[in-house]
Image (cartoon, helix red, strand yellow):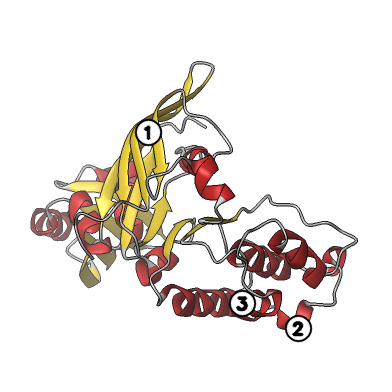
Amino acid sequence: MSSTATPAVALSGLRKHYGAVAAVDGVDLAIRPGEVVALLGPNGAGKSTAIDMVLGLSAPDAGTVRVFGRSPAEAVREGAIGAMLQNGALLADLTVAETVRLVASLHRKPIPVERALRRAGCEDLAGRRANRLSGGQSQRVRFAIALVSDPALLVLDEPTAAMDPATRRDFWQAMYEDTASGRTVLFATHYLEEAEEYADRVVLMNRGRIAADGTVAEVRAVAGGRTVRAAVPGADAAALRALPGVTGCELRDGRVQLASADSDATLRALLARHPEAHDVEIAAAGLESAFLSLTREQEPVR
């Protein structure tokens, strides 16, 4: 990928307020063509607000949004953006095929409806009315709608919400195959394992700002530290939190999990205080640990 290529998405100084609340508070972000980027963050981090501005559904109070060098409105008109929103309504009385065909008719160069249904894994639902779909089936239809314009950028907001594990796996398999041709994908999710497995890059938002940006390994490194796990009979959570290096503590049924910025110091102090501790494990922080570390003790804004 050329470093001089026009970014698929470019956000500069982006801000959006709702009254006194800063939902997005000075975001700068560039996504390269062909990247698969996971947008993570706790509820109220500003993810959906940022996505709305990328799609042109909301105007920023300050800053700029460009999609392949164009305004969001221009990119949408040209069919360059396909969106799958978790609150996108389907017309209850239309069949799935009729719904996708209706959306296809709004675009200049749509792909055949049958191909969109096949790529979204919902060919078998073509004749079913929208009001007879399960939550997971509705999500697959929304995916077909997002694909039918053959967009260069796919924006997915919680795409696997309401899907069971098997359907979620099938969805990501279809997504993986679809992005092999170089399509850019920006997806927001609460399933951290999806980001770990499918994203080239992770952008973590908190309180309207970017808290971390990089590969999964790089985001883990920003959070730093390791996780210490052990069976500790009679452990007290408050005392464990006071151990040197500890940045987080979970205690359940005598099993302790400690997030630590200095695992050596933490383990030495733990064993000194609890020599009966056993089944000790030390592991590098996972994405979930990094997520919790980077967002802990910060109040969400929206």
**Which of disc 1 and disc 3 is earlier in sequence?**
3
Q: Real-space Cα distance between discs 3 and 1?
A: 34 Å
Amino acid, disc 3: Thr
**Which of disc 3 and disc 2 is earlier in sequence?**
2
Q: Quadrant of the N terminus?
A: bottom left
Identify the residue at image location x=41%, y=38%.
65
Numbered mark located on residue 298 in the image: 1
Dot 3, crowdedness within 10 Å: few (<14), some or many (≥20)?
some
Q: Real-space Cα distance between discs 1 and 2?
A: 45 Å
Farthest residue to the right: give it: 93
Q: Quadrant of residue 295?
A: top left
Identify the residue at image location x=49%, y=16%.
20
Numbered mark located on residue 167 in the image: 3
As drawn, 89 above or below 228: above
Label 2 secondary element = helix
2 vs 3, front mark: 2
Please say whether residue 236 is visible from this viewpoint: no
The x, y position of residue 30, in whole percent, is 30, 47
Q: Which residue is mark 2?
A: 124
Numbered mark located on residue 286 in the image: none
Amino acid, disc 2: Asp
Label 3 secondary element = helix
The x, y position of residue 154, in whole percent, is 50, 60
Label 1 secondary element = loop
Dot 2, crowdedness within 10 Å: few (<14), some or many (≥20)?
few
Amino acid, disc 1: Gln
Q: Are marks 3 and 1 in contact (CB under 8 Å)?
A: no
Please say whether residue 86 is visible from this viewpoint: yes
